Amino acid sequence: MCGICGYYLSKKGISSKNILEMNNAIRHRGPDDEGFWLSDGQQGQSFSGENSTQKVKNTFPVLPDSVSNIALGFRRLSILDLSEKGHQPMLSDNERITITFNGEIYNFKTLRKELEDLGHHFKSHSDTEVILRSYEEWGTDMLSRFDGMFAIALVDLDKKKLLLARDRIGMKPLFYYKKENELIWGSEIKALLKNECVTPEINWQGVYTNFLFQTTLAPETCFQNIYSLEPATFLIFDMNDFSSSKEKYWQFPTKKLIQITEQEAITEVDKLLSESVEKQLFADVPVTSMMSGGIDSTLITAKSKPYKEDINAFTIAYQFSENEVKNASLMAEKIEIPHHIKNVTDEEVLDQLKENIQHFEEPYSSLEVLMNAAEYAKDLGFKVVLSGNGADELFAGYSHSLKLHKWKPMRKFNFIRHFIFTNDSFSKKVKNYFSQDSMLDFFRQSQVGMKPFETKSVFKKKIFNKINSDLNNKKLSETKDYQGLYEYDMKYSLSSHHVFRDDLSAMKYGVEFRYPYLSNDLVDYVSTLPENLRYNGVQNKPLLRKVAEKYVHPEILKMPKRGFSFPLSHFIKTEPKVKTFILENLDSLKKRDFFNPKVIDDWWNNQNNEYDSVKVWQLVTFELWYQKYFENR
């Protein structure tokens, strides 16, 4: 739902053309309405825009070319309370507090009732107003009460405070630029780059972690002075002296449930997932479910049927996805729901290849089909899509989790690396394997990005010298059991990677993805379960499989885990247009003074497996990212 942007400049005012251009850069996130609010820090005024609804235009003047220190911009994707009463930026009754909000608060009805009992009165049926009243009542303590996905920007003129906040898991992104007396923020980096105060510069530290982990680890981005607000975090700026403080408002529960049986856990997960699905089905627009054919999405679809009789589902079909499509169809027949199948051809991928890659605001390591899914959902008339994302992280679904038991005893032999003196490819790989000293190293090894020794060889020396290859500041609790890996999966695989890509993919077409597996209660409960119930080292998602047994088709339970993306390696080897596309971009990249041309050629000429293709693709997507955000602005 929606896109937000804004700025606060403590020492100067700038033209309102800045907020207009920032808002236009994220127009795709909200095609239904737009709004603006400008302030000098003392008083504020609301404005409409060219794309505002007629009623909003009748209420507020069109944004003029004026100067201000503070500005908020908003693009609306109408999902709850479709009337103009849900328009943003939304102001408090005394017009001293102004909020913009992107996301959904699923427990907003419960909170609204609580606030009404405390004497608050509401003008709309939107969750945005619930956030506004919650701030008036509880201040930043409101954040821990919200069950949902959100990015919030709020200005309090009386307290001279500016608040930026993000949901627990990071399902909704929020980026900010901070330098000297300038604070600029937005749902996408594209918006920040339209502000006259921001000149894009490469953050090589961010590029380095991106190459290692398939994504840039928050709070860093690949842009200098542009940061990603971490999940479960809020940032407060004092508008008097530009001082700031950043706080976490939630942590993963650490206290474990001890005396609990497997059946009790199955029953409770079943109940909590049903409750989450029911809440997330609520919308004033049509809702569908995206079924990939695996356990996660088919279970969500099956659980939707009792709460929404007219639920639909759709599946994206692409090369080598025949089994997934077949299983999704079996599930649709089993629960008797309409099932739409979209065949995405190689030609369609090629037609949109450059545009889709450049829509992501950093280099990337695969070929996404999520944009195809979002576009198809939009074509079918759906604004809201239920997703199975989050189940792999929450229930130990990834193949690397099954390697944990093997890695733990092998660490005692890590000293071997000091006795490997040969420098051939195999020796480097062995040395890399025996360099996994921490849980962070183990997690990094599983992400199928470049290895540290490969990044060192491909970067020009003068660039690599700018990078701190010591990633100790990225370590989490580092417990030596599955809990430690779980934290990395949730924070780095899910928050920095999957839901971030989901959001960019979906919102490109004005579609909202929702994640029933990531409700507050379900995440809290599963996090407290004993390891033996959630993880056995033999089978992925053992607990969720038992929950799914009575809902999904038996064939689905037999299907091995597969990623939801195009078969990149096969595509590179078999499609001449892709080879030409890659070579053209690699040639362009080699002319830059960033990377070692000899290593690039070596990687291209020696692709023996899928992993080798990923390294090449990371370089190609870097080149496309650089073209988009540094050359063709």
Image (tube, rainbow, N blue to C red):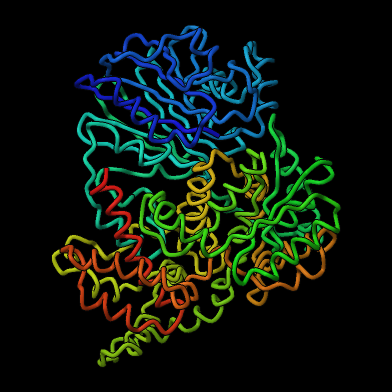
520 vs 86: above or below = below
Number of marks in picture: 0
515 vs 180: above or below = below
Residue 110 appears left or right of 478: right
Looking at the picture, how far across and down is residue 287, in whole percent? 70, 40
Q: Residue 293 is drawn in which quadrant?
A: bottom right
Looking at the picture, how far across and down is residue 492, in whole percent? 46, 57
Camera-side residue of 494 and 416: 494
Residue at horizontal 67%, vertical 52%?
Answer: 290
Looking at the picture, how far across and down is residue 120, in whole percent? 62, 12
Residue at horizontal 24%, vertical 72%?
Answer: 458
Camera-side residue of 591 and 396: 591
Task: Evaluate whether residue 296 shows in this view.
Answer: yes
Looking at the picture, how far across and down is residue 397, in whole percent? 62, 66
Task: Evaluate whether residue 261 shows in this view.
Answer: no
Q: Residue 107 is drawn in which quadrant?
A: top right
631 vs 459: above or below = above
Residue at horizontal 33%, vertical 14%?
Answer: 39
Residue 110 appears left or right of 609: right
| Image quadrant in which the N terminus is located | top right
Residue at horizontal 59%, vertical 40%?
Answer: 512
Q: Residue 275 is drawn in which quadrant?
A: top right
| Image quadrant in which the C terminus is located | top left
- Residue lying at the far left of the rendered structure: 462
Camera-side residue of 431 and 384: 384
